[in-house]
Amino acid sequence: MTETQKDRPWLFRTYAGHSTAKASNALYRGNLAKGQTGLSVAFDLPTQTGYDSDHELSKGEVGKVGVPVAHLGDMRMLFDDIPLEQMNTSMTINATAPWLLALYIAVAEEQGADVSKLQGTVQNDIIKEYLSRGTYICPPKPSLRMITDVAAYTRQHLPKWNPMNVCSYHLQEAGATPEQELAFALATATAVLDDLKGKVSDADFPAMVGRISFFVNAGIRFVTELCKMRAFTELWDEICRERYGVEDAKYRRFRYGVQVNSLGLTEPQPENNVYRILIEMLAVTLSKNARARAVQLPAWNEALGLPRPWDQQWSLRMQQILAYETDLLEYGDLFDGNPAVTAKVEELKDGARSELAQIDAMGGAVAAIEYMKSRLVESNAERIGQIETGDTIVVGVNRWTEGEPSPLTSGPEAIMVADPEAEADQIARLNAWRADRDSAAVEAALAKVRQAAATGENIMPASIEAAKAGATTGEWGDVVRNAFGLYRGPTGVSKNPSNRTEGLEDIREQVNAVSDRLGRRLKFLVGKPGLDGHSNGAEQIAARARDCGMDISYEGIRLTPSEIVEAARNDDAHVVGLSILSGSHIPLIGELMDKMRAEGLSHIPVVVGGIIPDKDAERLLAMGVAKVYTPKDFELNRIMFDIVSLVDPAPVAAE
């Protein structure tokens, strides 16, 4: 078969962004030169949550998990020498999606692009932020309104743009079963489309249904994941046809991009992750009728730290070899008519329909957020428990843990380290930007954003005007916060005693004994300082501590070190446990430990968990941190025994 007869391959992407817009631009241009065919932009946490780089909550977070974009100048620098009219750009942005899209449009116009030809996606899925990722700003209803504002605006002005990427990716990482992943994502999509119906005409609505895309996760259970994607395509076709009356089949297509499971990558024997990534990619590419439209792969060493350009290149080459060296794209669907696949797809669809019926009975996805969050925490607890007991085997983690040291992880440059000067550089440029702009024009433009938020008019035109005037991400975010209010999502962790005590008899006995010696129940404060919204670890630690009989305090994400220290004092905590996965552990923990000493609380042991390199762990211990845990420490009961031993002066030994 000739090359022209082959199916066109999916878009090759690499999820990337770090340090500064200038550094990220160089990375993007380098990846495009290596054969990447689309961009996937990772933004840092201040940008995702609507804060400027010099805000108190931004300390230590600038440029860590993505690129900081505080104003039009940053966006201009990010895409310097990259013609946006010719590019397909995915921006992983949710709460601030209207603002980042406004900046993108402003830069495209500066480049002379025809805005109607722009192609790409803003993720713009706020519901999964309440459930799993935590970069929300406002309550659900105004957040949903801004999602559909973006959709309605793109229908008129950016007809090739995907205004929303329903994101089940983080749901799987938060513990969702395949049935939950299907149901929660589809419930989110229907919530958005139901709201959008009032903002576009009946004639335009089917085409808008066709612009909704999805972003999914592919885990290691290869056959189940492949069947999940076929179930997604069939259920979405069913919903579009039966719920919304969409007759044109092209508007009912399930269009999705994928990143394979990052949190499933292992810190022990990380070279094994290469095989995991390959197998997970096959699940979303082998079945033609359920093939991803875009694929981005993590680097093999992301459980250790920030991957280098070479590591990202290795993942890109994996895609290119599959697409261009194999004969995959020369054939139709390989699984049509397979009885095992058909049976599994039907089983998944039935389970998803049951969950969808439950969500619909509660009033839809927005009304069911607390229910869905609690279901995720329960499912994740079950998943982790199976790894602990060995019922689920993870090679190199709970089986076959002995191995040769990897030459790939040796040496001082085995992983890339974020530029320690990047935050100061970003703040200096932000201050210079503020000094050079027309402040009156900025205030006038922000007043229009404020008015749009208050009156219900589409927020996009005013946001674009504010972007061009020179407003900053934090200023736009402040307008939104003041208009709609702040929101603290459900944690999914009940403080009530749990019946889940199987296998915890020994640790519960120890907790009771120590609590008796203390004269009250052992108090464990779990906190997440900074802007990191990856709360899975904190939730599971809090839930297991509760099940072990401890008195837990866990208020969720996005706390300042001062707030955590105040809570430790007010709660009279015996132990403080902190979870940070964004790489900002050194500055945030350093500040917290200083405040603990200043408040006379240095007697309270502090334990820290996260993606923490060995050298950083040594620094944390030198600061006075009692224990440091990384992804290799998957045995939660062992951590519970450690916590008890830190409180009790008498030695405590685990059986």
Image: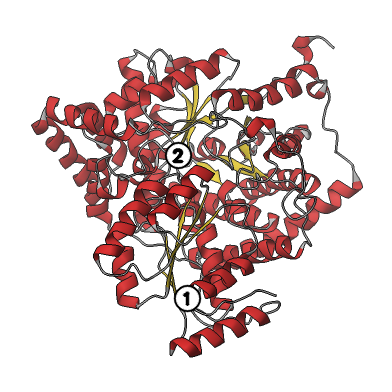
2 or 1: mark nearer the eye: 1
Query: Any mark on residue 143, and which?
Result: none
Q: Mark 1: which amino acid?
A: Val
**Image quarter of the C terminus:** bottom right
- Where in the figure is residue 616, as x and y percent of width and height? 47, 45
Q: Which residue is mark 2?
A: 65
Q: Residue at x 64, y 51 (%)?
A: 242
Please tell me which residue is depicted at 40% across the width and 59% down the height of the picture: 624
Task: Please rate how many residues cluster around mark 1, counting C-alpha atoms within 10 Å: few if below 14, some from 14 to 19, many from 20.
Answer: many
Say if residue 650 shows up in the picture: yes
Residue 383 percent across, percent down from the top left: 68, 61
The image quarter containing residue 468 is top left
Residue count near mark 2 (Cα–Cα under 10 Å), binned few <14, some 14–19, many ≥20: many
Whole-angstrom CA distance, mark 2 to mark 1, is 34 Å
Q: Is residue 597 above or below residue 311?
A: below
> Residue 268, how many percent across, how many down?
67, 46
Secondary structure under badge 1? helix
**Residue at (76% x, 35% y) in the render:** 282
Q: Residue 575, image x and y in percent?
A: 43, 71
- Determine contact: label 2, label 1, CB under 8 Å: no
| Residue at 74% across, 55% down | 398
Q: Amino acid at mark 2?
A: Val
Where does label 1 land, which residue?
A: 647
Against 205, residue 622 (above or below) is below
Q: Secondary structure at mark 2?
A: loop
